[in-house]
Image (tube, helix red, strand yellow):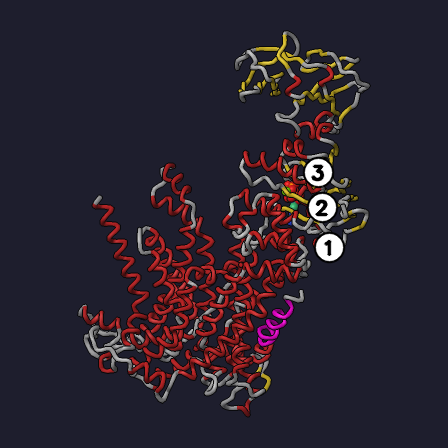
Amino acid sequence: MTGKRLRTVVLVAIAAVLLAIWAFPVLWALLTSFKTERDVLAYPPTVIFTPTLRNYADVLFGSASLLPNLLSSVIVAGVSTFVTLLLAIPAAYALARLELPAKRASGFYVLATQMLPPVGLIIPYYLVLQKVGMLDTYTGLIVIYLTFSLPFAIWLLVSYFEDIPREMEEAALLDRAGRFRALWYVILPQVRGGIAVTTIFVFLNAWNEFLFAVVLGGNRVRPVTVAMFNYISVEQTLWAKLAAGAMLAMAPVILLGLIAQRHIVKGLTVGAVKGGGRRA
Amino acid sequence: MALFLPALVVLIVTTSAPLVYLAWTSLERIDLSMPWLSGFAGAGNYLQMGADPRFWHSLWLTLIYTVSTVVLQVLLGLGLALLVLRIPKGQGILRVAAILPIVLAPVVVGLFWRTLVLAPDVGLVDVVTRALGLPSYNWLGDPKLALLSVIAIHTWQWTPFAFLVMLASLSSLPPDVFEAARIDRASAWQRFRYITLPLIRPAIVIVVIMRTMIALSAFAAIFAATGGGPGTATEILNLYAYRTSFSELNLGYGAALAMVLLAITLAVSFVMFRARRAR
Amino acid sequence: MANAGRVSMRGIVKRHGSFTALHGIDLDIAPGEFFALLGPSGSGKTTTLRILAGLEPLDAGQVMLDGVDVTAREPGERDVAMVFQSYALYPHMTVYENIAFPLRMVGTAKGETDRAVKDAAAKVHIDHLLARRPGELSGGQQQRCALARAIVRKPRLFLLDEPLSNLDAKLRLETRVELRKLQRALGVTAVYVTHDQEEAMTIADRVAVFMDGRIVQVGRPQDIFARPATSVVAAFIGSPPMNLLPADLRDGELRVAGVPLPAPRMAGRDGPITLGVRPAALRIAERGLPARVYLVENLGDTTIVDLDVAGQVIKLRTEQAPNVREGDHVHVAFAPEAMHVFDPATGQRREG
Ligand SMILES: Nc1ncnc2c1ncn2[C@@H]1O[C@H](COP(=O)(O)OP(=O)(O)O)[C@@H](O)[C@H]1O
Ligand SMILES: [Mg+2]
């Protein structure tokens, strides 16, 4: 019927507007990154222009190259993700499965650490690292990244461990595997997907972190988020380059986000099912 | 226990120990710009706060910022989810679009908005308003508009989160319940009010709790877009603590401000978890 | 057999907080026996089985296998295999790998493992499915895979927790028979949990009847059927189960709903009793208890007639189609030998 048709049209139109609102700034930045600085400032803005790769070349290989910053981000996010998983996988398994003394209290403690405001952590870290001369080191930044990634990873992994029926493990015990081999041969292979999703989220959060990086980083350790911020403060109007840099800086997380697409709701709410996640 | 211990120790060392040190710092006077004045201050920093209009202002902004962004996210997220659920096709692409803002670094989002979206004359918003024959506004330069702008930025970035959670929650509702309600002659509004809402309440509560925590410690997007300014127009408590500590290098007072934020966060989460369990 | 498989449990107590799931279970199972744990849901059967497997810590008592106290031993050290109700197949392994797993864990040589896996798979007719994963099997095939994984290691004790409950009715009957044959062929002791009394009665050598965390009767199926130890057991066994009616015993005369009946030969004290009669022992007669026909259920080869006797519904089962209709007033009678007498207060059987 026409009434129904009309409704569908309206709904689709609304969806299209939504799509535009959410995707447009990114697409606009993508477009801008291929413009010359002159085209950027044109009014009315041009959609048809001669695309140039100059901005990317400049951002990558110019005087203020982003490459060292990308490397910084890879190191900080990569290592902190690795350490996080190393600690979080056994901890999550223990929380999900084993009879721990004060299990509830432990779980709650992990949760509480996740809700601390970052600004409250950064001050003591700054003072201590300054005293021991470890400002602007990878170690300092990686350690403070554990404060948000470890609780998050533990809770996300707990939810995956809990999805595995207890009987699976009991069967392995009866099959003479013992605790350790039951974990290794039976449980871990089944949480592989969960570990992958956790890795993606932890990496993503670490990659996007700004406050800790801007305070504890420096000339040597400067992740892309800080570099982007400095870029705009220094080179006020070079927007095309900014856009190109931003696209490069955000490409990994956009990619990871799209890969983990189907798991994103679980990843985002998991802390929440029991407590609260944090990313700001 | 041996499995859990390493993580526990790391958490205690990396999170709890620093907090103790923070509490201690908040009782000290540590001013890196005037190091000769450093020393124990007792409750001095906290007493100073009472007479500090900038503190009260930041507290007020925190309240406005948190409440408005959370309410907006929930209302918009729920509304959009309800709408999108009725779209026969294209839900998939919308989900993908919704993921974009979420995965972006808040600092980059702040920069995008500051330049490409809200900049006078050439920003997207100005282009549109000018095309409609409206005057051009200085969205981030005008103190009144700046607060609106940072609220809009946060809402833009995180409404997709609420949207995705609500959408997931709505799509998992059993359809037969709604069919039963139709047979029981419930109108569309009644079905929403008495069936949908109660069923997705857990999702709403989760969104509210999570988003409140995050809004309270929002930093990077505001910092990138306005830096807390113009003046102190967008300086929520979190930013005030940061600026005090790292721009004015008055770490003792900054620590005291951070302690207040910590106390607020804990109190709010405590109340919210209580409320959640009570019902 | 190298492994005998004699089970003995003594005074097993299991608590969950303030709730006591098992109140001191004593159980003896002979080598090679097919032993069923029967009881309504929540009566403690699974808990007992899990304690036997070593999966559940216990609060008091002792578990002995072949005369050795294994109470403190890990599940893997008890030489027992288990088929879980959910099968608990490892989803990331093929059927072959699933079956091979218990052998791999003790370092059995490749060639020997291969032979044993194929042999076990052939015994349960899944040798053509070895390359598949559990997700690609039907419910019945999954069940067989779990079975193969349990028999491949030739355990001394074979534990099954409602292994047929996830199968459809027809498959359940077939598998039941096969399971029995398999156990006989292997000569292994089997402990089998079920809430289905018919299943337990047809498959088991002996049955332990569980009620509320206690074993109320142990015996051969025919003995339990013939002489239920309590009125609760009586009301649980048989399809339909035994009819129970309040009655009065006075001066050697039995009265049911005021009607005098010939009393069974028994040294019972005078006073109220609970009278039990199996549905098949009832017949419609010229004289006896007056009853009204309430419902006639024709099941083809048998007919169940629900009768209202003084406000209480009892069931009658007969192979000949009875000539009654709903609403008819009739009389029901039964032979004195068919009567079971229980103490109304304790539920205990009174012997004649
Ligand atoms: N982990 C547990 N916590 C509390 N109660 C339990 C737990 N496990 C079992 N129970 C209780 O113990 C009783 C016996 O359970 P179970 O052995 O599984 O019964 P069955 O197998 O006969 O149905 C039940 O009432 C059950 O509710
Ligand atoms: Mg059970």
Residue C27 visible (yes or no): no
Q: Position of residue C164 (x, y in %)?
A: 59, 39
The residue identified by callout 2 is: C157
Image x and y of residue B157, in percent: 37, 67
* Residue at the spot 35% in from the left edge and 66% down from the top edge: B156
Identify residue type, mark 3: Phe
Magenta span main SS: helix
Q: Which mark is residue C34?
A: 3
Please determine whether, in this image, residue A84 is positioned above or below residue B166: below
Residue assigned mark 1: C77
Q: Are marks 2 and 3 on the same chain?
A: yes
Q: Is residue C217 visible?
A: yes
Viewer-closest of A226 and B136: A226
Position of residue C120 relative to residue B31, above or below, is above
| Disc 3 chain ID | C
Image-quarter location of ligand 1:
top right
Return the chain for callout 2: C
Report, in whole angstroms, how far the alpha carbon at label 2 lies from the one at label 1.
Answer: 12 Å
Would you say residue A161 sits in the magenta stretch? no
Quarter of the rendering containing residue C278:
top right
- Farthest residue toward the top? C286
